[in-house]
Each structure stands twice: as C-alpha cells, then as structure tokens.
Image (cartoon, grey):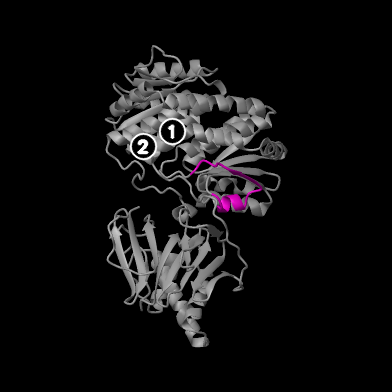
Amino acid sequence: YDSWGVAVLNSNGIEVSKQVGVVTTDPLSIHGNIGIGHTRWATHGAVTEDNAHPHYAADKSFVLAHNGITENAEELKAMLEKKGHEFHTETDTETIVRLIEEKRKQLAKISRAPLEMRLREAVRAAFKDLRGRNTIIILAKDGEVIAARNGSPLVLGTKENRKNNSELYFSSDVLSFGAHVSSVLVMENGQMVSKNAHGVQVMDIAKGTKVTSKFEKNAIVGADVDKGAYDHYMLKEIHDNPLVIRQVLKELDANYKKLATAIKKAKTVYMIGSGTAGAAAAQIAFYLRVYGKIRAVSLIGAEASDYYPLIRKGDLLISPSQSGETADVLEVLELAKKRGAQIASHVNMPGSMMTRMSDFKFMAQAGPEICVMSTKIFVSQIAWGYLVAKAVGGKLTEGKKNLQSLANTVDRQLKDAAWMSDIRKLATKLARTEDLYLLGKGQNLQIIKEGMVKIIEGSYIHAHGIPAGDLKHYAITLMEEGTPVIAVVSNDELKASVLNAIHEVKARGAKVVGVSPTNADQFNDWLKVPDTRETSAIMNVVPLQLLAYYMALARGNNIDKPRNIAKSVTVK
C-alpha cells in the first residue's frame, strides 16, 4: 500500500528495513531465518519511513507491527509520556509498543519470571488496556514471535519441509501464504499465540490460560493466483464471471431452502455490507422484496448505528463479503449475535470471522480475487442473492435455470471481440472527462451505483450514480452541453421511466451512452447487451466493469492496486 517494512533476526540482533511506496521485488540487504513484515495503509500519521512498521522497543529488544486502530491512543500516550516514555512517530501503533514496555517494567518489579515470559505477560496486560480492533505481531531478540488478536484477523499456517523443520507463517490473510502451507489455524478474538524453542502455544488473553487449538487442512492450497494471458488481474477476474455464476449453481438446493425458511420466519431481514458488498447487499434486498415478497432492509456497515436499538432476537442479518473480515460489518454482526439474531453470510475466503459466527454459511468458491477492485465476487454475491430470493418465492428451479442461461450468455459476450473492442473505444473516450453520471432504476439502481464505484476506484474520475426518477429533483442542475451520462436501460416495466429521464438530460445537452438490449433515439452511443430478463441487472454490470477497467487503462493508473484503498478493510 503506501509504505512497508521488514524486521529480521540475525547475529546483529533485530535489523529493520523500511521504505515508502509499494513493496518492491529488489533483494533486501538484511538476512535471517525469522522475520516479520508489514504493508501500511496509513490511518494515524503521514506516509513516512518513520511511521512505517515494524516499530522498535526503546532498547531494541523487540519490534512490533500492527493491524487496526487504537481508539484510546491519545489517552494512553499522555499517560505514558508522564511516566517518561518518549515517542518518535505519529502512529497509534507506537503507543502499543510503549504500553508493552511499561507493563514489562511493572512486571519486572514484582516477578522473577524469565524476561521472555514477562514479555508475553506484558502483551497480555497491555491488551486489556487497548480499545478498538487491534491485532499485533512481535519479534523478540531471543527469537520468540508473539501475536495477539482483537478484531483484525490473524491466521497461522504451517508445512513440514524436506529437513523436517517446521516452517510457520503468521498473517492477516490465508491467501498470502496459501501456496506454502498445508495446514491453517485461525485465531479467535481475544487469543494470543507465541512461537519459541518450545513450540507453539495459544493463550486466552483475558484469562491467561492455555487454549487447545488444532490446525486444519488448508482449503485454498493450489488456488490459481496467476493472471494467465491477461494483462491485469481485474480483466482476468471479469472473465471469470461465468465461472462464479456456475459455482453459485453448485450449492445444494437444501441449503438454499433452509435459508429461505429462516428468511420467511424472521421478524426483520437486514442485508449488510460495505463498499461494493454494500451495493451487493442492497441488490439482494431488492431481489428479496421483488421475488420473495420479503420486507428486506439494506444497511451500510459503518452507517448502521441508528439501527442498533432495533436489532433483536428473531431478526436475520445477511452479509455478503469477499474477505469475511470487514471491520465495520463485523461490529454490527457481533452486536446482533449478542441480541440473539441469526446471521447468514456469503464469503469467498475460508476460515473468516464472518463465516465462523454465521448460522447459515455459504462460500462463494470463486477462487482468489487479487485485484483490489472487486468484480467477480460482486457478480457471485448478487447471483447468489437472486437464487436465495427465488428460493424464498418457491421458484428455486426456475432461478437456477435463469442463472445457467445467464452464465452462458455472459461467456459468449466476453468472447465477442467486436463487443470488447466497442467497450474499449468507448472507455477511451470517457476517460478524457473528469465528471461522469450514471442513470438507472429498479433492478439497475444498485448496478449503476456499483458502476460508479468501479469507475471512481479505477480511473479516479468523479462519477455519480443517480436514481433516474430522482434526477429532476436535484442532479438536473449538473446537466449541460457535453456532460457524459451512462444510462442502463432494461426491457422491463420501468424502461419508459428511464427513457424519460434520458430525454431530460439530452434536452440540456448531455451525451448519453445507452447500455441496453435495444437502441433508442436518445442514445449518442449504444452499448448493446443481451436481454436476460430477470437476471438483466447481473448481465448489465459486466460492461460497466469493463468500462471501468479500460478507463483506468487509458489513464495509465495502477489497475490492480488503485491508490488509497485496501482489498480487505479490517479497520473501522
């Protein structure tokens, strides 16, 4: 992301190397067999080498890297400064380092335990004072590695090498070491783990007692993380859309029907997600209302606090997620779980916290999604949601038939060289603008919002998704000669209403790109898409994903790693 660092233990002690910018493939000048590394997405403090992790203890007896946000950092810092601790960075992470040092200092006065044991106890004591979602890893000078989890993810992986020496990996994501391990241990909240000469030990942070944990078989070993013949992961993953729709069809009918029964019994059904998953959640809520006749409410994770007093036993929360570790969504689900509500999830990463806390667990089985911008997982999520809604309405078989036809249609379109060429030409033209608007209604409302998200993420162009029916109430003031507008129009009962909105922007000089099965006089450019009826929204998002890709390409941006955003948002 914006900076990174590595700490390695060798005969010189703990050596640290930090850099600003993306991780390079250049060899480092430090060497050793035990190390920790960190890629930073800045929350507290500017992007500098000093603020990059890992951070040294004052005596350089350990280094620490951190994933999360320490919500009471300023309060702790003031207390620690009064006790004589000096701070050298702007990060909340350094507060954790100094707090551990202070706890170790206090323990030294009352305990004769060895230094390494005092470090573990100091970590445990420090965690009791931290507020927020914080996960850390420590490399000590004696070779011990200590990691502790509260909120942000923590996983371990292991594999015996040829010399029968155990190789152990710590990470926030199974995918990072998936190709190198055979077994995985997912740490629970409130647990810490240490690895030293005596082996691996897991402990409950609050109680200080040992926890029996078992490594499980790595579910993603051998997963395809190669771009193949494609220039970018994003393009490959868009071409995976037919595959992920077919994966949704492989889920057992019994599982869909079991969730459908719970949905029909629930007092209130909440769909919840953030970012692209937020648009997916809203689209699934639409399907539940239209095809399941369910009163479904969609929520954005970070903006759901006003619903907290309303969530209760008998409710059902459904969350689509790529990682299953989105912090602001997990916070809502944790509250709901305590209230006695049920949880269903659709996740792509095995072993996630969201999956582990769910009553109804669905896995996308879509393969790794490497590009930070989600494409195939969004398609997987809304295809799954469509089937859930059809199951609620007692028409699961019909839904599966429609999705099978959709997968075949999307496959054909992506192999149509002329269609792809038209999209690329159109994207090159749109990439020259700095403001762009999208219009949609009904089944396409969340689709144009997701198109907006993709265009913003990839091209850094200002884009605005506008409900077609709401246009005349405010956004019409932005329409003038040459304003680019993308209008998504399906052959459904709302088509005439959307075309009316297009008339209104055309009258003010807008240049309209129509994404539709049929051409219209109002379109300046027409991007033809097949009419797949009930699944038209899923079909329509594919050309919007491709437009976003080629717009980003035309502007020379880093497509697979856009600036300032992270793949898995594990902090609030």
Residue 352 lies within the magenta run:
yes
Q: Position of residue 514 (x, y in %)?
A: 40, 20
Left or right: 244 in relation to 361? left
In primary-sequence order, the first of circles 1 and 2 is 2
Give the camera-side residue of 325 and 285.
325
Q: Which residues are magenta?
A: 350-367
The image quadrant that residue 206 belongs to is bottom right
Say left or right for 381 vs 341: left
What residue would you read off at disc 2?
230
Residue at far top of view: 521
Which residue occupies the extreme front position in the image? Answer: 162
Q: Which mark is residue 373?
A: none
Residue 106, horizontal then vertical, whole percent: 48, 82
Residue sitting at x 49%, y 24%:
409
Front one among 501 and 238: 238
Q: Going by the image, does 303 lie left or right of 547?
A: right
User: Which residue occupies 41% across, 49% down?
Assistant: 566
